[in-house]
Image (cartoon, helix red, strand yellow):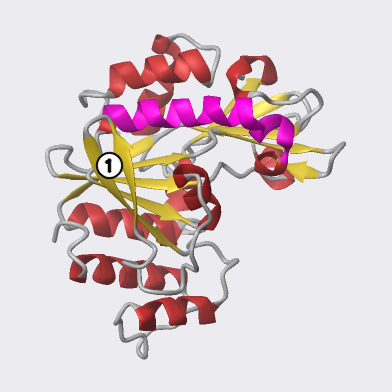
């Protein structure tokens, strides 16, 4: 996560004005710590008291298990720029115990798929890191972010954040959309790769077609100023989609999956790279 990259200074301003009540210099120290500890097996997330969450995040009173993921980026920004877009961070009781954080009053700050943690890249989120590494090694720049920067559980309504109308109602959604559009205007990506139907729907403001079909059939476009950006949607590399869903996706995209285990998400990530290369969506 090169801090000398062209968009880092304005990105910190976007984050400090909309996501966290922190000065740019404080955000700088977060990224500095993550960079220094990138290959350190003991680097952890950052624990903050909940009042540091910016009011623009529209977190309801009494929300628990709050978390924020700040964007992460890898590769050479002079090459083709790819944004990987998810729906939101994810936190659990286990993650709060690990950080010795209070589930009611603290927020855990990290990066998408905990890419700043070596243990996460090598274990729980290995499939996502395999995908990012594959894109970078093929000569692409990768910027990872989410539709919603904040995650929480509303225990009163028994809902996670993106299902909470108080969080994702019309006014709130426009704020989250504004933040994302500011990011995209900074990055000026050539391609956006979306994980899952929810992120697709929130980004393009329309229902997501069935993802298991040809990736060209689900392709969308997003206008960022005077640039039209292609949007491609793939199945999430989490454990939730069944192997059959991946197998159908591979077959409908002309990929011979007979030699891979569709339940192995790392193998699926490699297959994604092959498909994106063949479709000339990414550099290779």
Specify the farthest residue to the right: 156
Front-most of residues 77 and 245: 245
Does dot 1 land on a helix, a strand or a loop? Answer: strand
Q: Is residue 114 visible?
A: no
Q: Quadrant of the N terminus?
A: top left
Establish if 22 lies above or below 19: above
Can you give x and y, in whole percent of width and height, for residue 58 in the image? 66, 23
**Residue 30, image quadrant:** top left
Q: Please check the rendered image and state whether residue 171 is part of the magenta-colored stretch, yes or no.
A: yes
The residue singled out by tag 1 in the image is 74
Residue 170 lies in what quarter of the image? top right
Magenta segment main secondary structure: helix
The magenta stretch spans residue 245: no
Q: Nearer the viewer, residue 136 or 163?
A: 163
Magenta highlight range: 164-186
User: Residue 165, located in which quarter of the rendered image?
Assistant: top right
Q: For this view, does 28 lie left or right of residue 93?
A: left
Q: Residue furthest bottom?
A: 258
Residue 205 rendering spot, x and y as whole percentages: 50, 44
221 shown above or below 138: above
Q: Is residue 69 visible?
A: yes
Quadrant holding the C terminus: bottom left
Residue 204, position as x, y percentages in the image? 45, 46
Q: Residue at x 33, y 33 (%)?
A: 184
Q: Position of residue 269 (x, y in %)?
A: 37, 66
Viewed as shown, does residue 78 lie left or right of 101?
left
18 horizontally vs 183: left or right: right
- Residue appearing at x 34%, y 43% in the figure: 222
Badge 1, how many Cα within 10 Å: few under 14, some, many 20+? Answer: some
Residue at the spot 77% in from the left edge and 44% down from the top edge = 159
Q: Residue at x 37, y 48 (%)?
A: 84
């Amino acid at each position: 996560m090169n801090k000398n990259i062209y968009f880092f200074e304005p990105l910190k301003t976007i984050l400090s004005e909309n996501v966290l009540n922190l000065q740019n210099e404080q955000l700088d120290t977060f990224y500095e710590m993550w960079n220094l500890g990138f290959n350190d097996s003991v680097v952890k997330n950052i624990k903050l008291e909940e009042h540091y969450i910016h009011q623009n995040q529209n977190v309801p009173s009494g929300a628990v298990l709050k978390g924020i993921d700040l964007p992460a980026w890898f590769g050479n920004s002079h090459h083709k720029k790819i944004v990987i877009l998810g729906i939101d961070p994810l936190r659990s009781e286990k993650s709060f115990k690990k950080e010795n954080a209070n589930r009611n009053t603290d927020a855990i700050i990290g990066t998408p798929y905990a890419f700043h943690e070596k243990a996460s890249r090598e274990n729980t989120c290995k499939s996502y890191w395999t995908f990012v590494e594959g894109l970078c090694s093929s000569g692409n720049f990768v910027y990872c972010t989410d539709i919603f920067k904040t995650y929480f559980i509303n225990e009163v309504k028994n809902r996670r954040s993106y299902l909470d109308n108080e969080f994702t109602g019309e006014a709130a959604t426009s704020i989250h959309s504004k933040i994302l559009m500011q990011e995209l205007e900074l990055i000026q990506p050539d391609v956006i790769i979306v994980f899952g139907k929810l992120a697709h729907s929130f980004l393009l403001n329309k229902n997501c077609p069935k993802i298991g079909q040809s990736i060209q059939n689900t392709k969308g476009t997003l206008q960022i100023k005077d640039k039209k950006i292609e949007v491609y949607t793939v199945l999430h590399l989490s454990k939730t989609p069944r192997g059959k869903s991946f197998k159908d996706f591979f077959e409908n995209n002309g990929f011979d999956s007979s030699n891979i285990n569709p339940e192995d998400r790392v193998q699926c990530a490699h297959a994604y790279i092959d498909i994106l290369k063949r479709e000339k969506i990414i550099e290779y």
